[in-house]
Image (cartoon, rainbow, N blue to C red):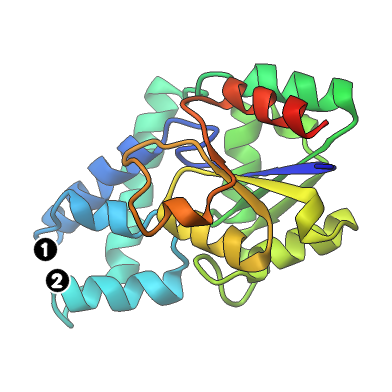
Amino acid sequence: MIKAVIFDMDGLMLDTEVLLNRFWRQASSDLGFEMKPYHPLAIRSMSRRYAVGYLKRELGESFDYQAVRAHRIELMNAYIDEHGLTKKKGLDELLDYLHSSGIKPAVCTATDTERTKRYLSDVGVLDKFDELICGNMVKIGKPAPYIYINACEKLGLPPEECMALEDSPNGVISAAVAGLNVVMVPDQTEPSDDIRPLLYGCCGSLDKVIDLLKKEG
């Protein structure tokens, strides 16, 4: 039986991956690097230690990850301040179901604690989660499994009693290696042939996860 559902944030709960793609590319261009659309897709949910190496291999050793990332955050914050954030379809329905069913909801995101709290507060769901496990809380982030192992420990549950919801391959790998039941809710890309075997399920929107949980119950 599933006793906890652990949510990724960007692209899963919030429609921010499209903004991350846009502003990674703009920030790179502003600083003299040509980032292609597939580059931000490749680093979705990926911790800095992995993303730096990937982008340097793709864009050259001179790629200044720290400067580009700082500029990307500046651009994205300005956009969000003006336009706000959009919740993904079915988030409220799923959270309501979890609370009514006694299933613990938690967050497991590569984003740092400050921005995670700000984003979730902005869309009115911060207080609906039992635990927040953020990228700055672990030394090695996704796709390594440690952030999900940490999440299960904080919840006091074994991985097999937890469901992870992810929209990206890096997140799926992290949760699967940690031993959780992984459900992908695709955002920018559908699951590839090498990702599908890792999945407990695949849903078109968050409210569809309710059906999977009802089957478990």
* Residue 187 drawn above or below residue 179: above
Mark 2 vs mark 1: give the one in front: 2
Question: Could you say which is closer to the camera, residue 104 or residue 49?
Answer: 104
Asked if marks 2 and 1 touch (Cβ < 8 Å), the reply is yes
The number of numbered badges drawn on the structure is 2
| Quarter of the rendering occupied by the N terminus | top right
In the image, is 107 to the left or to the right of 142? Answer: right
Helix, strand or loop status at disc 1:
loop
The local crowd at label 2, few if under 14, some if 14 to 19, many if 20 or more residues have their Cα within 10 Å, is some
Question: Which amino acid lies under the numbered mark 1 shown in the image of this protein?
Answer: Phe
Question: Which amino acid lies under the numbered mark 2 shown in the image of this protein?
Answer: Leu
Residue that label 1 marks: 33
The local crowd at label 1, few if under 14, some if 14 to 19, many if 20 or more residues have their Cα within 10 Å, is some
Q: Residue at x 58, y 56 (%)?
A: 112
In the image, is 155 to the left or to the right of 87? Answer: right
* Residue 141 drawn above or below residue 165: below
Rendering coords of residue 167 (x, y %): 46, 43
Residue 188 shows in the view: yes
Question: Could you say which is closer to the camera, residue 168 or residue 83?
Answer: 168
Residue 188 placement: quadrant = top left
Question: Could you say which is closer to the camera, residue 39 or residue 79?
Answer: 39
Q: Which of marks 2 and 1 is nearer the N terminus?
A: 1
Residue 8 shows in the view: no
Residue that label 2 marks: 59
Q: Which residue is drawn at 84% across and 60% down?
A: 158
